[in-house]
Image (cartoon, rainbow, N blue to C red):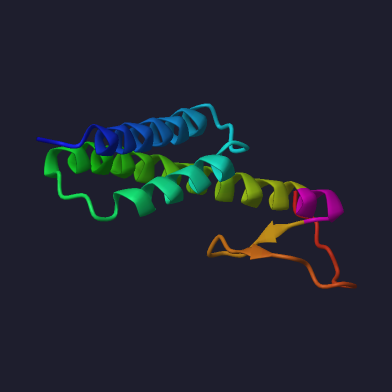
Amino acid sequence: MTDPAADDGVDRMAHLLDGVHDALMRADYAPLAGLTVGIEAELARLEDRRDGAALLRVRARAERNEVCLQAAQRGVRSARRRLEEIRAARSGLITYDDKGRRCVPQAGAEMVKRF
């Protein structure tokens, strides 16, 4: 027979992981720090659990969150790159070489117009 208090721990962990997922889906990153503290505390309590079925439920949620966190990281990196591009464009001319790599013209370099 399983311990009801232990099941509460699994349920709390599942609830916290669902909270992370919901926050990520809303792109609301503010609650993630608090949820992480709760997850770490529950993880310490569940460390000695041997109930495979309950832990599989938790693992499935954690793996789902891993995919969402990776996607959020890619999105944040992409947004940061775009902001850097916008800032760079605002500060001056950006050109590209024949291989498509970004080149910043040298100061004092002569500009050639082609029409």
Residue 90 located within the stretch drawn in magenta: yes
Relative to the observer, which residue lies in front, 100 or 86?
86
Residue 96 is drawn in which quadrant? bottom right
95 or 82: nearer the eye? Answer: 82
Seen in the image, is 114 located left or right of residue 102? right
The magenta-colored residue range is 87-93
Image position, residue 64 (x, y; %): 32, 38
Q: Position of residue 104 (x, y in %)?
A: 74, 66
> In x, y percent, where is residue 15?
39, 30
50 to 100, vertically: above or below: above
Query: Looking at the image, which residue is at 86% across and 69% down?
Result: 110
x%, y% of residue 44? Answer: 37, 54
Q: Nearer the viewer, residue 40 or 61?
A: 40
Foreground pick, 47 / 14: 47
Picture residue at 57% right of the left edge, 51% below the top: 77
Name which residue lies at 33% across and 38% down. 9
- Against 50, is 11 above or below? above
**Would you say the magenta stretch is mainly helix, strand or loop?**
helix
